[in-house]
Image (cartoon, helix red, strand yellow):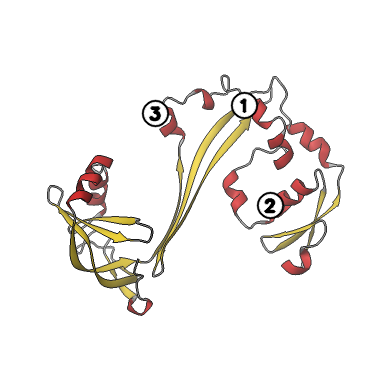
Amino acid sequence: EEAFQPMATRNRRFFPNGPEGPDSFDIPMMAKSHCMPYYFWQEENVRVLGVPYRQNVTMYIFMPMNSTRQLVQSMQSKITAERVNDIVTKMKMKSVTVMFPKMHISNSISLKNVLQQLGVYTLFERNEADLKRLLASNTTDRFGGDPLDLLEVLQDTKENAILLLQQQIPNCIIEERSNIDRGECLKDHCAYGGKTCVCCIESFRRRRRRDAFTPSKDDPIFVNEMLHKVDLTVNERGTEGGAATATLIDRISS
């Protein structure tokens, strides 16, 4: 609700292994004073702070006293939905001074083991999964037949520019052109990505390649991996985050 003031941000010491740890270093640290929901989790010696956002959203920060990596890992194993709800109901407004690091976190998490623990097995078994109908038409036409990591579709790369052209003009032959800016590049049969201009000059040779990837009725298709990618930025203006889930599909030729 109330942003950090950029003028209060400056380099301060950060202690990933506590004040006595050997690997402290300086990072940009935001600071502000405000009244916020606060609770001291006495059983675990952890301070809990609620940072209010707009639209009735709150970010809860859990910080062990004299925090270290080991204490954080121990605390994580004890945090449950029931525990968080209990703590939230006990929080009281308190005047606090908050120093919080600016950060950008990006991570990919495998969902395969989680789904298998929930009982989803057949999807990942090459001899039992039956996904041929998913790739037989729309997916093959859209992505040129290649099993694709969908996370990469979100990136501004030359490969994605080529993919866009192939979606618009199936089976075209790609030509790369250098020393052309984005504005000049974006014309008929051209796309721009990764600081590269790519254009479509032919449209017949790729048909054999697409057909080679079109699954036959005897080719088993299964999910090899499922990834969830999270990208989070925390700065003076607030928190910006995005997430995407990608399914990696394998085709085994018989």
Residue 183, x across and y down, in percent: 74, 68
Element under label 2?
Answer: helix
Element under label 1?
Answer: loop
Q: Which three-letter amino acid code belongs to the residue tagged 3?
A: Gln
Place residue 193 in its image quadrant. bottom right
Q: Which three-letter amino acid code belongs to the residue tagged 2?
A: Glu
Q: Residues within 10 Å of mark 1 (few under 14, many from 20)?
A: some
Residue at 82%, 56% in the rendered image: 189
Q: Is residue 110 left or right of residue 156?
A: left
Residue at 68%, 36% in the rendered image: 139
User: Dividing the image into 4 quarters, which one contains the C terminus?
Assistant: top right
Q: Residues within 10 Å of mark 3 (few under 14, many from 20)?
A: few
Residue 46, x across and y down, in percent: 18, 53
Q: Which three-letter amino acid code belongs to the residue tagged 1?
A: Leu
Residue under pointer 1: 131
Residue under pointer 3: 117
User: In this view of the protein, can residue 2 be seen by the observer?
Assistant: yes
Label ID, residue 159: 2
**Cα–Cα gap, marks 2 and 3:** 35 Å
**Cα–Cα gap, marks 2 and 1:** 26 Å
User: In this view of the protein, can residue 180 be seen by the observer?
Assistant: no
Q: Nearer the viewer, residue 50 or 182?
A: 50
